[in-house]
Image: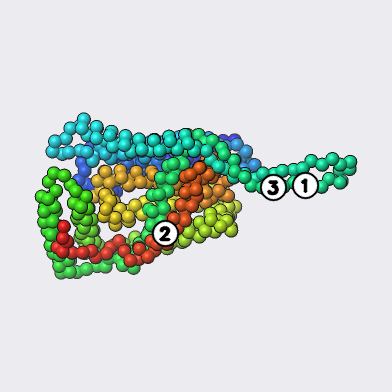
Amino acid sequence: MLNWWLIVILVVVALLCVGLGLYVLFYFVSEDDDGGDYGARAIVVLGMVVAMGVVLLLPLDVANATDPTVPHKYSNTLNTQLMWQIVLWILLILALVVVPFVMFFYEAFDPEKNRLGKQILQAVLYTLAVFGVFAIICGVCYSLVGVARVPVKTYVGFPQLVVDVDDVVYNGSRGSAYEDIGVSFFTYCVGLMCFIGWIAFFFYGGVGLVSFPIDLILGFVRRTKAISGSRFAEEMAIVAAKSDALLELSLELQRKCRGSISASQRNKINILRNETYLLEAQQEQLIWAYTKAGGSPFVVYGRLLLGIVSCGMSLAWILHIFIYNTFDVSPFLNNILTALDGVFALFGVIAYGVFVFYLMWVTFEGQVRLGMRLVFLQIHPLKPHDTTLNSLLFNVSLCLLTGPAIVEFAARSFQEYGPLTAINALMNIYVLHLKGIGCFIKWAQLCFVGISLLSVVWVLLCPVKVRRRDPTKLRL
């Protein structure tokens, strides 16, 4: 029987992802960019749609799963196994080929003497380097250890010859063993993407799981208060003096960097870029405090409420990792979702979608946090109406890389809620037990929790809006 509710949910999820992708583009893209670069803008939207869509397909897979105990659920409405293969292949191609090519192509543009052929050649070479490294590692590892060591239960029974059936006594034994099962190349590619994604996920997701709720709550406590005109003029004069100092340092560094740029000079450039970004944020905060007197109370208290709810969800995820994923004491969140399904059929599916989408969102928050703090990396901050396309593409590529890891983690965490799903068979039977990388994928969640617990101290000691060093005292 065709379940039209699943078709409706699929259409709604697709429209929601497209809407959020367009919102991210128009909210963050710089106003200085002209109307061109439509290809890069389309890739930004497509990347966000795929990154969010691959996560939001998890509750759809649960709703589509067969269940012999429920009428009309003996057959699947959608071929979710094929759906996951198509979506994950698209994600892999976007993350390793399309987005890197567009980002390198955009960064190779020279406004003074640009040549299209040179721009394309540079983008192709860098993209081939990225894809080539992944292809070589994946091909070599698949040819050598492309199997999954799946745990199985072994049962041995001993036959008996008896005259009377009443004299039969069961005599057997049970044990545990591992069965080596060859996996497809697609499965191994997904496993390697999960391995790479977990490295980014336990850093960005671990930090974001803590920083997102704490920043919202601290943002309410330390919210911007209204200031007088004289105070505004005084503070803006200080900002102007600091900007002049940064300009002088930038010109001095530009003179020193003629020709080749050394590693120390590149680090100084990143320091100046970070200081400039923070000074612009300070100026925007002053303008906001003077013109809007701290903002609307609906927004202010709404962010506080969101911070409290997010704090509860972060705590629930950390507890679930220990209670269910690690020690298997109780299904915990699985029982909650099952109970919600008992109230209304879609409540559990919706709650599942909220929990997994929260992981994607806090990972995005962690990207902003770590991208702003680590001065030895290229900084791509996301600022409303002041973000370049290459910064958007960089953050989209991070979202795509962490997508498979989030899917694997969510499928493992809710395997009792969705045991008959296609993604459960792929992730929890094969990917989780791949030789070599499966062990890392299994225990990476403890690194995720460890980073989260360490981030509590870091976020409290290093809030977003802190007073930084005076640029006039910087020595480059």
> Closer to the camera, 69 or 47?
47
Q: Above or below — where is 317 with respect to 408?
A: below
Horizontal arrangement in the rendering, residue 127 relative to residue 355 (left or right)? left
Marks 2 and 3, the one that precedes in the sequence: 3
> Closer to the camera, 169 or 274?
169
For the question of whether residue 236 can be seen, the reply is: no
Q: Mark 1 points at which residue?
A: 171
Q: Which amino acid does label 2 sit on?
A: Ser
Single out the mark in the foreground, 1 or 2.
1
Residue sitting at x 46%, y 52%:
444
- Circles 2 and 3 in contact, beta carbons < 8 Å: no
Q: What residue type is labelled 1?
A: Asn
**SS state under label 2:** helix
Residue 452: mark? 2
In three-dimensional space, the C-alpha distance between marks 1 and 2, rounded to whole angstroms, equals 50 Å
Q: Above or below — where is 473 with respect to 428?
A: below
Q: Mark 3 points at which residue?
A: 174
Single out the mark in the foreground, 2 or 3.
3
| Percent coordinates x, y for residue 347 in the rendering | 53, 51
Residue sitting at x 11%, y 53%:
252
Residue sitting at x 47%, y 49%:
440
Quarter holding residue 465: bottom left
**SS state under label 3:** strand
**SS state under label 1:** loop
Q: What residue type is labelled 3?
A: Arg
| Percent coordinates x, y for residue 80 in the rendering | 52, 37
Q: Above or below — where is 126 with respect to 337?
A: above
